[in-house]
Amino acid sequence: MTETLNLARARLLPQEPATRRVAMSLFEAVETLPIISPHGHVDAGWFAKDEPFEDAVTVFLWPDHYVLRMLYSQGVGLNTLGIAGGELPVELDRRTIWRRFASHYRLFRGTPSRLWLDHAFSTVFGLDVQLTLETADHYFDTINAALASPGFRPRALFERFGIEVIATTEGALDALDDHKAIRASGWNGRVITTFRPDDVVDPDREDFHDNLGVLAALTGEDVSRWEGYLAALRKRRAHFREAGGATATDHGHPSARTADLPPDAVQRLFTRLTNGRGEAGDAETFRAQMLTEMAVMAAEDGMTMQLHPGSWRNHNPWLMQAYGRDKGADIPQRVSFTDALKPLLDRVGNRADLTLILFTLDESNYARELAPLAGHYPCLRLGPAWWFHDSPEGMLRFRRQTTETAGFYNTVGFNDDTRAFFSIPARHDLARRMDCHYLAELVVTHRISKSEAQEVAVDLAYNLPKAAYKL
Amino acid sequence: MTETLNLARARLLPQEPATRRVAMSLFEAVETLPIISPHGHVDAGWFAKDEPFEDAVTVFLWPDHYVLRMLYSQGVGLNTLGIAGGELPVELDRRTIWRRFASHYRLFRGTPSRLWLDHAFSTVFGLDVQLTLETADHYFDTINAALASPGFRPRALFERFGIEVIATTEGALDALDDHKAIRASGWNGRVITTFRPDDVVDPDREDFHDNLGVLAALTGEDVSRWEGYLAALRKRRAHFREAGGATATDHGHPSARTADLPPDAVQRLFTRLTNGRGEAGDAETFRAQMLTEMAVMAAEDGMTMQLHPGSWRNHNPWLMQAYGRDKGADIPQRVSFTDALKPLLDRVGNRADLTLILFTLDESNYARELAPLAGHYPCLRLGPAWWFHDSPEGMLRFRRQTTETAGFYNTVGFNDDTRAFFSIPARHDLARRMDCHYLAELVVTHRISKSEAQEVAVDLAYNLPKAAYKL
Amino acid sequence: MTETLNLARARLLPQEPATRRVAMSLFEAVETLPIISPHGHVDAGWFAKDEPFEDAVTVFLWPDHYVLRMLYSQGVGLNTLGIAGGELPVELDRRTIWRRFASHYRLFRGTPSRLWLDHAFSTVFGLDVQLTLETADHYFDTINAALASPGFRPRALFERFGIEVIATTEGALDALDDHKAIRASGWNGRVITTFRPDDVVDPDREDFHDNLGVLAALTGEDVSRWEGYLAALRKRRAHFREAGGATATDHGHPSARTADLPPDAVQRLFTRLTNGRGEAGDAETFRAQMLTEMAVMAAEDGMTMQLHPGSWRNHNPWLMQAYGRDKGADIPQRVSFTDALKPLLDRVGNRADLTLILFTLDESNYARELAPLAGHYPCLRLGPAWWFHDSPEGMLRFRRQTTETAGFYNTVGFNDDTRAFFSIPARHDLARRMDCHYLAELVVTHRISKSEAQEVAVDLAYNLPKAAYKL
């Protein structure tokens, strides 16, 4: 039997009727606010070229590591989803791939992927039945037909989605050609870049030395010297601001460890690493030192700094070798902040003109370390519930565990953090609903007034991200 | 004043009336499904011999470490409960012991023990007043009279409880006589064993060398050689399958650490340990290596593997010396999985024909490590909320923290994990209620449809455990 | 627009109407019970001298590190709040300071500080509009006028607040003059001290050696010898009991680590440390040993022992240097108990005549370690949700994560733990409401009966703290 796809008006709001009414009232005032997307991974090239998206598979399956990981966990080989890897035969027929996805759709019950997908199916493509094996062809044909029409090109969707500004993320060596092309095109959509220097600050990367060579070529600095290396990074930061409109940097480290070594020690460390004579622990120490250096530069040039620690990237070596990165095999680990951030905070923690936004995959830090740190240090703010926690329950845990110590105003609203462009409205819709859900609980239990909650709801949806990212 | 004992029809379901109605509707469809008990600790001898249970004290107090630990924590000496130990006088009068338990029954307020006990008192023995010192004699006499009747013998209760299959747990050297006797008896209740090899893979045990001797005698293998030792374990696994109907193995390690050493290194390690020349860390490394070996064997012979890490067994040395094991002095510790399981996963993690079920006592891993791991690796599944978390709030935390990342289909339904036979229906009843509680919340907040929730409820109560344990 | 300040009768109780009614009924029976405040930091001198409090700023801002930390986190310099430090000019005008606080009052939305402050504003000072910049002067004038009147002196408020007993905390060398003066005054308010020996057991303190000198002078013992040092501590404990009415000790250590070294090893350790020849790790080992020694003394002299581990005190060195201690820069860290407490528990854990109350800032321990430990060892009890967790959501997490394993009777009711005297009724009101909130959930989901919940509510609010602290 085919079930209707019908997004309930009150979805995700509290169960208790009076609380739900308050939440709905709060939500109605933020529902149509423009989308501020200050941290994401969509392809700037889409907006530069404005070409049609290919089909349902390339839009909904391949770019979504949440979808791939769940299917893979239940024995669905990536090759059977059209992803080449290893020596297995690859399914080439897109309709077959889409049917395979549809036949496993029940796996997503209870996950945010399901909510995001259904939201896009319904609001973007007007689908009104649930995705099942029986409706798979209908979906495939409907989506593909729509994608071929002008209204579904990237720029048209950007405007339809109500995006005020969206940030992409580029490596430190990126030429930013797509961003330059967008600016040159005369289109007035605001697409900006974010400076992500992991490729030139992580000595454990195989391409580290090559990357330093490119860095030198791009900047004209002598990056074999510590001061030249720092100068080169400053130049790239400036280039990202000027050519790509960047207002922020992003740092994805294995841990939150920071360091602030004496100048001569850091020079020796840098020399060892660039000469290929790094010792045990040197790479970790260098990454730690570089977080502090980046914070110092951020205090100088005004860019907002983001730290996303704690993911073991590409945990599955067989999958990595066969299929490459970003197939869902990044697994979180325990991290700590109170000790790890201390060297950085000792250096710049009391500067109110610096904004360092912290994210975590280890929720045991929310109440224990992150909220107390952000509730004290002027430079710190808390990023939203991240990645696996970008979900209804994850967001409630975030608010319940951080608000009582850090308040709302040490948080920065929502990040969608996605390369799945069609899910962006769904993700912001979900985040706004959950914030209103939480605020309504505070109102009904008389912890804040209704008018205060309304003000906070708007701040979380719109004002705080604009302020934190200087947009 | 004596209070009525009256199991409310809607107990444990959500407070909000509409959500409660949905939950009740879901529960009604799973309430009477047969009990699948794939992991437990009841005595197979009960079903082999089918003799009457002794009395209220031996049924409800002595086998229940949850009950003993709570009483002990409040200064009730184990000797005063009839358990001999140390040099203290032992209470011998069973009625006095029962009264002592009854007089402390308020300690269990808010605990699952209270819910399990009341359920058994009411549904198994028809008691209709609360247990207090005043009603203690009435309880004692009612229970003992019932236990003497034929309808309360183990096999009759097995059938009355609606048990389709129950697994016991035996050490690797167990002769499985009780299981053989059950099979030979013609009774058609399905009681199967589980292969638990801790006694022959943990070099820290005092009886490790003696156990290897028995292992050699039982299998005819030369267990002084690494290959002979592995062959002996393969034979015992086969024996457990053939003589005891085992479909699963169980592994209770201090940590989740695994290893996958090169063959020559593991041979040297094994030789050191079996020759009594083990070095610091060798025992831990060996246990770690053996988890990987067991996973490889499981991929070969199709047995489902279970890992229960993180308990400091017999934390209280005085109690251990005086009263022995299993008196409630096992205390959890922090564990991690992302790093610990990597060697095993690198070896067999991508095999969809292997099922490795993970349990934890450290809930900080649910959302951080376990759900991401199970939501990626084909071999991994999540066991239910375990031990201290086998409780209403514990189960909600489990679902709330794992479903959004791993979904429902990477979990395996409920385990009762108990030696308290009379509590088994209560435990399954509680687990089904809490799953329906959680599912009803998803329905009322429009995260899944009612018909999907109904399907999931049946899967969690019946289909998933049968599939995961190949029953 | 000025909003009304109106404490809702049902504030903080559950949203669902039937559950709220049960909670309200439970609360009404505990609302006016006397306040037992067995652990706090108010100034005993207030009650000794009974002089008027100064003004709104000294009552509500300066003593409240929760308030200072939140303001500081948002860039409000402490000097602009009238706190001298560093080389920045200090705001001297109290009305200006108060206005600055009022203009940032929205930062406290969703925090317990807001609830405590509003409660005091309303119930103590009769204020009936919300604090904003517009109402700041009205607040300042109203509060200051009230503080000048006799009914707002410390002893009058003590009685008005319904305090049956309040404990302050003093260092081991304190002369207890204020406590002696209170006793000598004939006033019958019960103000008692608590013995906090951190200053004479922590070799990492700069004043450690000087403190030992004072200890020797006060006790006449030869504290250069281990046995003399222990004897001196026993004398100070006795003095605190006799001169200050102490029934408890308090221990604020970086970790929960304990030790129980052989006598000769501890003697050598003590000698090294007192001779200034301490080695790496010695200070930590000594603090660990001293926790065990203190537990042994507590088992001898009957004082209740409290352990508050896991805070990195004065994490912000610049702030510490400029402004001193207790400005909100204490940040929690991960701690563990199962391993850390074992040496102490091996020594005295089975003694039911000892009470050791454990607190944590690392909530991952609630269900994993603390509840299992307290649910087994006769000497252990769990302190309430502490510090950053002394909040509505924090208290719910505490009960939800500890009750199912440790029950209610291994907990000790509420501690206000504050130096903000005017917030004490608010804090107890909040704690009683949250306990009734939790209990009502248990009642409505049929986990305990209404009459049981009523009994537990009274126990948590009154009987358990009196018993645990022997008051």
Image: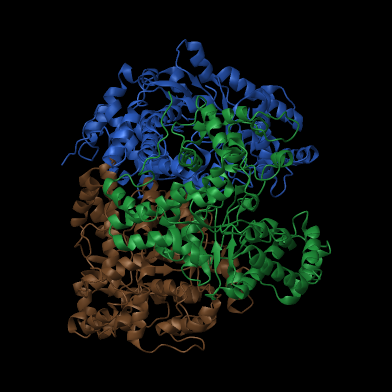
Chain colours: A brown, B green, C blue
Horizontally, is A214 left or right of B89 in the view? left
- Give percent across and percent down for residue C132: 23, 40
Eyeballing the image, is C470 above or below C20? above
Q: How many numbered marks appear?
A: 0
Nearer to the camera, A385 or B77: B77
When asked about the image quadrant of residue C389, the answer is: top left
Residue B126 horizontal/vertical position (percent): 46, 37
Q: Quadrant of residue B216?
A: bottom right
Left/right placement of residue A48 relative to residue A209 reads left
Picture residue at 67% right of the left edge, 39% below the top: C344
Q: Is residue A144 above or below residue B56?
A: below
Is residue B439 in view? yes
Quadrant in which residue B217 is drawn = bottom right
Residue located farthest toward the top when viewing the structure as drawn: C186
Q: Which corner quadrant holds the N terminus of chain A?
A: bottom left
Q: Nearer the viewer, residue C61 or B237?
A: B237
Residue C461 placement, left or right of C251: left
Indicate the position of residue B190 as horizontal and vertical percent values: 56, 59
**Residue drawn at 30 percent across, 81 percent down:** A56
Identify the residue shown where x is 54% and y is 19%.
Answer: C177
Residue C93 can be seen in this image: no
Q: Is residue A340 above or below residue B330?
A: below
**Which percent across, then down, holds residue B457?**
38, 59
For this view, does C111 lie left or right of residue C44? left
Q: Nearer the viewer, residue C114 or C85?
A: C114
Depth check: give the residue in front, C232 or B96: B96
Quick one: quadrant of the C terminus of chain A? bottom left
